Amino acid sequence: MITSVLVANRGEIACRVVRTCRELGIRTVAVHSDADANALHTRVADTAVRLPGSAPADTYLRGDLIVKAALAAGADAVHPGYGFLSENAGFARAVQDAGLVWIGPPPEAIEAMASKTRAKELLGIEPLREVTEADLPVLVKAAAGGGGRGMRVVRHLADLDAELAAARAEAASAFGDGEVFVEPYLEGGRHVEVQVLADTHGTVWALGTRDCSLQRRHQKVIEEAPAPGLPAALDDEVRALAVRAARAVGYAGAGTVEFLVAGDRAHFLEMNTRLQVEHPVTEAVFGVDLVAGQIRVAEGHALAEDPPPARGHAVEARLYAEDPARDWAPQTGRLHRLAVPDAVRLDTGYADGDDIGVHYDPMLAKVVAHAPTRAEAIRKLAAALDRAVIHGPVTNRDLLVRSLRHPEFTAARMDTGFYDRHLPGLTEPAPDPHAPLAAALADAHGRSRFGGWRNVPSQPQTKRYLMAGEEHEARYRHGGQGLEADGVRVAHADAHLVILDVDGVERRFEVSRYGDRVYVNTTALTALPRFPDPTAQHAPGSLLAPMPGTVVRVADGLTAGTPVKAGEPLLWLEAMKMQHKITAPVTGTLSELHAVPGQQVEPGMLLAVVKESAP
């Protein structure tokens, strides 16, 4: 019987495994990099072991250090979570060779399925060996790992070599394996998968289907179970194929078989030999704990002959620290507060006051709603996200709410091209026009009881804010009947709560402030100084770092004086395990180049300047 588990992972999934272990009475051991020294997963585990360094290659991808940590902490089992070494057969063997229990499938099954190229060959599906114009578009894909890293859609043959190189580099950084392959890219398909759970006694459960079609950069954003609208025959087909794939490799534990569904046909994509990020929707529908199931299978227990019956519908949204309106740029900084209504499930690796760094995936949390019907689950999840309190870096929260309420999604007509079609409309700013006034009134009360009321009554007080990229001025005065603002009656105002009477309807505004950053309900504002800093100006054509990260590559031959075209890639930044292209904003000449490979950059740092050509 397992008594102590080392979780060979970090963040949300490490906290998730610790939670189930605690419920089962199992002691837990966390591992952490230097960047994660005070991360939530280290605080909720019973004990923790340091992995020196911050980069994944030096820490969470060092199987030798993790095995050593498990032995030193007295653990008798290792749970890999997902990502990192979860699909590494060598690591699984090293765990077993050290006399520890591996909470995962046999290494032989991992070898058969963890490489997507070998998995396809096992099922008689050959990847593209040579790509021609007739094959386009194609998808370049990492053979190991997942999560959208190491994936590139290629629509022009001339781009293939560059995208292969970028995918290899990204895959090597994320998974320690730079192998990639090429397969046809099917436009307009749905991403459907089947959750399996198998024991060592020959029983394999197919725990229904999931739809994961809403994706950005081939990484899932919203997932649900069961997959809506599948014809009964197709549903039976994918579940049967998933069971057959698991039996073919002697699978044990939790795994997922993924398909691209187009029309009434299902195309096999891969088998993930690990727990999936989206496993909570299956847990909600079937009333199971998949982590507990993994542990019991690893202990040798047999599953019941049949899985429990499905009940209702569940939807999950991944909350990321990123800006969808700026090419999904990851965001960093202090997470001051994260709270969602109790009606939904929150799986997170962060707590109030934690810092979001540059080294790892930008997912903050998963929010999951379960209800008797799909429509009710969607409504519940959208409302919970809409009411969530998120104070810190920019997130994709508004995008999630709008996606859940989009008619294409509510009618279950979505596919993997959803964001390609709808992103501009889903990211259109919609700030609350009364937020600046509420922020100004709260600020006046917060500074002092009488501060802000010293002007002559006829002279209004003013305060400037940046909101949704635009400057707004709030104006108010202290009159004979109390606070007044043009067209709005101030019913109440203190440092944290402002109530405005707008056309006879009282609206409540909860206000929080962290330095110059102000949150009014769900609207974020930045308080502006009375006198702007004249030095904070940049020449036209300046390329500024959009995020913290590392310069991993500069275009070949690029130097000051090089002519460039608008949209041409000039350099690449790596942040949060993804590579981001920085392109020329205009056609002209590169007049300055400050970025060099290996350089660490912060947001707003000047990377280069392009001088536009005369028309």
Image (cartoon, rainbow, N blue to C red):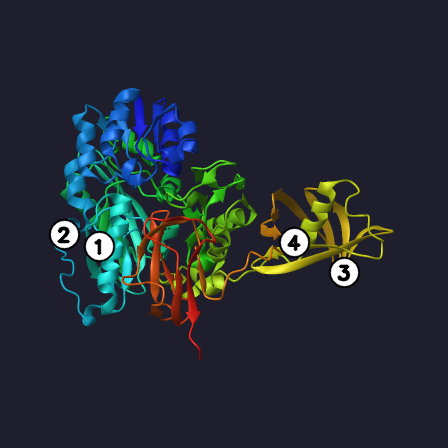
Taking depth in this image into account, of 450 and 102 the one nearest to the observer is 450
Report helix, strand or loop for mark 4.
helix
Please state, as top left, top right, bottom left or bottom right, where the N terminus lies in the image: top left
Q: Nearer the viewer, mark 2 or mark 4?
A: 4
Residue carrying label 1: 268
Question: Residue 497 placed where, x, y %?
Answer: 69, 44
For badge 3, the amino acid type reads Gly
Task: Give the residue number, with chain letter if any, for mark 2.
Answer: 123
Q: Sequence order check: which comes first, mark 2 or mark 1? A: 2
In the image, what residue type sits under mark 1? Phe
Whichever of callouts 2 and 4 sits on the residue coming sooner in the sequence is: 2
Q: Which mark, residue 508?
A: none
The numbered disc on residue 435 is 4
**Residue at the location (18% across, 28% down)?**
96
For the point 22% across and 26% down, the residue is 101
Inter-mark Cα distance, 3 to 1: 60 Å
- The residue that disc 3 covers is 487
